[in-house]
Amino acid sequence: MQRPLTGHIRSDAHPLSLAEYEKTGGYDALRKVVGKITPKDVIQEVQNSGLRGRGGAGFPTGLKWTFVPQGENAPRPKYLAINGDEMEPGTFKDRLLLEGNPHLLLEGIILASYAAQLDVAYIFLRWAYKVAFQNLEQAIAEAEAKGYIGENILGSGFSLEVGVHSSAGRYMCGEETGLLNSLEGRRANPRAKPPFPPVVGLWGKPTIVNNVETLCCVPGILSNGVAWFKELSKTTTGGTKIFGVSGKVKKPGLGTAPRHNRARDHRGTRGWHARRPATPRLPARRRLDRLPHGRAPGHRDGLRHRPEGWQPNGNRHDDSPRRQDLSRRDGPQPDEILRTGILWLVHPLPRRPPLDPQDGQRHRRR
Amino acid sequence: MLSAEEKHQIQEELPHSAFKRGASIEALKIVQKHRGWVSDEALKDVAEILDMSPAELENVASFYTLIFRREVGKHVILLCDSISCWIMGYESILDHLKKKLGIGLGQTTPDKRFTLLTIPCLGACDHAPAMMIDETLHRDLTPEKIDRILEACE
Ligand SMILES: Cc1cc2nc3c(=O)[nH]c(=O)nc-3n(C[C@H](O)[C@H](O)[C@H](O)COP(=O)(O)O)c2cc1C
Ligand code: SF4
Ligand code: FES
């Protein structure tokens, strides 16, 4: 089982330094990509990999990046906001990445910013992550000294500023538009959508919001290729997922699973036998992505509008319920999506085939 | 009145954001670091630096759980009361803290050394129960461990 995101993290709680990270193949993707491959091709590669957001909603990452307006007349500066708020009780997967291998995240940030041509990146951290804050500041200083962050990165003409913001603690900061309000020094109330952040985000400028784990997947995709990433999982969307186990279990901690796995596939491994109910019942659908349990598969294909169409603010919206199938071969165009607004994304759960009355077995349909 | 040091640190935060108000949370945190909490006067002074009205800044300050608008003790104990810690014995830990300090939740000891608060998840669920005192995380808590930690706090 490959652990592309966490495999190199040291067990002694020390973060990998820049030199150590480079020894593991770190910043290879940066050198291969920035200034050498066009941003458009980078986005295409990420789209081909099928990478989906690891922050909960599972939106296709490459597709999100295509929404950013480009060209002479595009508003500047454009922003990247990295969502490391992680306030969901029982969730601590981003902490491992932030504390253990900050350069992996930084490389993901640089690559994402290059692909979507963004100027400034803010890492938004859960308030309690003090160690992560220090490790990141240290890593940013190292990367700046090497010329990986700052003006004219590796002579490519591309420049990027990276900063860290530590939250003052409120769950709603994790919601992407609440996060942007918080970065603007406001209450983290969510904003009405559309417009969506890639078009109108921080200070009204185009802004991509991505989760920490999502961005950590990017260097691997670009250095090892789409085929490698897809191989990691049996789902068509590829990759692995970090998940946490805590509570009354023998060995609490984090694990990596291929995206097709379910918690029941892990029962009994790594000593995760529950002494008492191990993990709380999952109250919200989005948590299924973070803590796969018996009925929760990884995201599958077929992202589409919920037929009855709810707006994120709870209102119904009557001209929007057109079904959109993002796995359609030509796919809806970005502006088409922004116009209708993606109202609710559903990841269809697999239906169990019905019992056959003849032999009492479940037969898979061909 | 803000001290020169506080003003200086706030000024240093301003260029990181496109508009001054973007530094408001950082500024409030700086004041809190120096004084333990944010008084009305301090809030007014910070608002002036940020070109915000005091009411606007108060709106922000009162939203975030970790900006204290009332006086707190020298050390603030933030005990996680979320699910994993709760399963792993939050209640007995809380009882121990209450008994040891002689105060209830939200209160400050008479000698102004400790304030006891609860907080949602600290992201240390794999080492529950957990608490944070000032900037330091303490994990896998037991009553004995708590005694030692509290003694180490001046
Ligand atoms: C109430 C609420 C809280 C959220 N909290 C988080 C969070 O803590 N971390 C996170 O990455 N995404 C969180 N999200 C999801 C974000 O809004 C957003 O979908 C995500 O950061 C996008 O990144 P991704 O596409 O890389 O997943 C939250 C959403 C809601 C509605
Ligand atoms: S919808 Fe309810 S639970 Fe969610 S952030 Fe708002 S108040 Fe909190
Ligand atoms: S539930 Fe207490 S630290 Fe997460």
Image (cartoon, coloured by chain):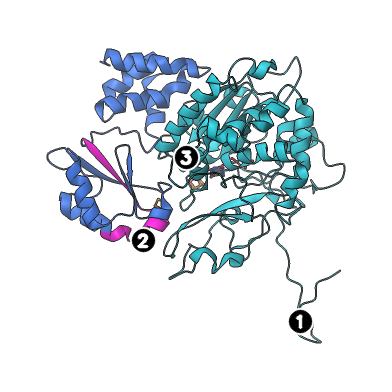
Which image quadrant for residue A177?
Answer: top right
What residue is pinned by disc 2? B88
* Residue depicted at x 67% and y 28%: A30
- Rendering quadrant holding ligand 1: top right
What residue is pinned by disc 1? A361
Q: Is residue B57 above or below residue A257?
A: above
* Residue depicted at x 75% and y 52%: A307
Q: In this view, does A272 lie above or below A343?
A: below
Query: Mark 1 to mark 3: distance in Å?
Result: 49 Å
Does residue B66 show up magenta in the picture? no
Determine whether, in the image, residue B126 is placed left or right of residue A353: left
Disc on res. A99: 3
Q: The blue chain is which one?
A: B
Query: What is the magenta range?
Result: B74-92
Image mark 1: chain: A
Q: Which image quarter is the N terminus of chain B in?
A: top left
Question: Is disc 3 placed on a helix, strand or loop?
Answer: helix
- Extreme residue toward the bottom, this view: A358
Determine whether, in the image, residue A195 is placed left or right of residue B142: right
Q: Cβ(mark 2) to ligand 3 < 8 Å? A: no
